Image: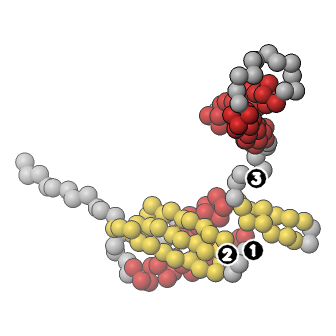
Amino acid sequence: MAKILDRLLLFIYSLSVGIISVLIILLLSGLTPDIVPSQYNEMTTIIVISVAAVLFLLSMRFFYISVRRDQGSLPSVDQRTEYGDVQISMETIENLCLKASSKFRSVRDVKSRIHVTEAGLEITIRAIVDGESSIPQLTTELQKAIHDYVQEITGIPVSHVSVYIANLVQSPNYKSRVE
């Protein structure tokens, strides 16, 4: 909703500035009958017409921005097959990473970030572990599982999976009460 309002305000602003700058150019260039007395010297008139022309050009640019359509604002990975084009959104690939990591009981609060390079996908995983499993072994298995799962499901080569262990899950301490 805010984006629509911003575009509407930009449209109104660019239209009004464009109209005002055209009127100033017409009045000061002598193309219209003298409505305003010519009490300005030549240098001032040239400067005002130049500023009005720049404002007119800027208003045309803003007008174009306010009326153009968004083109594919969602990032995706594009693939060409023998039957046509396939686009897979980054959100889909991130959710595939989350699904692959959900098979590990000791991994929690997983967040993923995807970067597309010429070599393939570079996946960065941020997770919290329970601290009861070997972290090097767990991260190696997690990297392999995410690599294989994403590559198998999407058909896009995965070049690198890095895992960042942010913290351990803090288990609540229960104090026993004696009654």
Query: Horizontal placement of 56 versus 101: left or right?
Result: right
Residue 30's x, y, as percent? Answer: 84, 27
User: Label 1 amino acid?
Assistant: Gly
**Residue 145 visible at all:** no
Q: Which mark is residue 117?
A: 2
Residue 137 position in % (x across, y down): 44, 83
**Nearest to N terminus: mark 1 or mark 2:** 2
- Give the amino acid at mark 2: Thr
Q: Which residue is mark 3?
A: 72
Left or right, 49 with reference to 101: right
- Which quadrant would the N terminus be assigned to in this image? top right
Give the residue displayed 39% in from the left and 68% down from the top: 166
Give the answer, above or below, for where 31 lies relative to 149. Answer: above
Q: Which residue is mark 1?
A: 155
Q: Nearer the viewer, residue 24 or 20?
A: 24
For the question of whether residue 41 can be seen, the reply is yes
- Residue 171's disc number: none
